[in-house]
Amino acid sequence: NAGVTQTPKFRILKIGQSMTLQCAQDMNHNYMYWYRQDPGMGLKLIYYSVGAGITDKGEVPNGYNVSRSTTEDFPLRLELAAPSQTSVYFCASSYALAGGTDTQYFGPGTRLTVL
Amino acid sequence: AQKVTQAQTEISVVEKEDVTLDCVYETRDTTYYLFWYKQPPSGELVFLIRRNSFDEQNEISGRYSWNFQKSTSSFNFTITASQVVDSAVYFCALSEALDNTDKLIFGTGTRLQVFP
């Protein structure tokens, strides 16, 4: 199992450009998440999905969009990049049973700089 | 409101010293889960432990141990006989069962530097 994979590892964008951060998991997890980590801070939730076709906003969703057309993939879209979106982005997944909380496993992260 | 506080921003120790990383949480839920993750200099997040709110037994895994105390809303992490490879940022996180989404609320992390 590759676990949670993310591409690209690094990216530099100009203000106003768009891009999609890719995330895939091969563990048959139903829940998937996107977090961002700003320097010296913990992770903050951007969006999450509890299954294919279902997504919802987290704590800091502005400027981002997501889709979940398959169980395996959960891409994060930045439409008009801004310097405030300079951060490290982590994708995570877990297998959640009803009434329980499973452990989230994280991808290696994508370091994004917007200039 | 739910919150995780890691008051220690940075800790420096010399190898073989014991070190305790503090974590204090706030939640209205009676069923919740607490986690510790390690983020080494390479940047990935490594899962260390998950504990549910009904299990207050302390846990030991090699040089690592965790002390969960509901009375003080704390879930502290101790490394015994620290090693240089323990140098990393350590995050404590909370997930509330009522939420049904398993979202994690992270503390701001404690950077541990272990010097030889």
Image: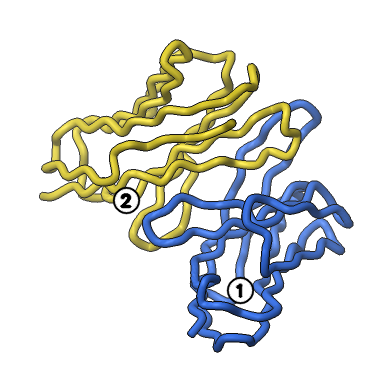
Chain colours: A blue, B yellow
Q: Residue at x 61, y 39 (%)?
A: A103
Q: Is residue A82 above or below residue A103?
A: below
Determine contact: label 2, label 1, CB under 8 Å: no
Q: Is residue B107 above or below residue A12?
A: above
Tell whether A111 sits left or right of A58: left
What residue did someone put label 2 on? B88
Per the image, label 1 sits on a secondary structure element best described as: strand
- Residue B86 seen: no
Label drawn at residue A7? 1
Q: Residue at x 14, y 36 (%)?
A: B16
The kind of residue tagged 2 is Ala
- Spatial CA distance of label 2 from label 1 is 24 Å
Q: Quadrant of residue A72?
A: bottom right
Q: Chain of mark 2?
A: B
Q: Is residue A73 above or below residue A111?
A: above
Tell whether B12 sits left or right of A51: left
The crowding category of the residue bearing disc 2, from other C-alpha atoms within 10 Å (few below 14, some 14 to 19, many at least 20), is some
Q: Is residue A34 above or below residue A104?
A: below
Tell whether B79 sits left or right of B75: left
Residue B93, horizontal then vertical, whole percent: 51, 37
Label drawn at residue B58? none
Q: Are the residues under marks 2 and 1 on the same chain?
A: no
Residue A62, horizontal then vertical, whole percent: 67, 64
Quadrant the N terminus of chain B occupies: top right
Residue B89, horizontal then vertical, whole percent: 35, 49
Tell whether B36 sits left or right of B30: left
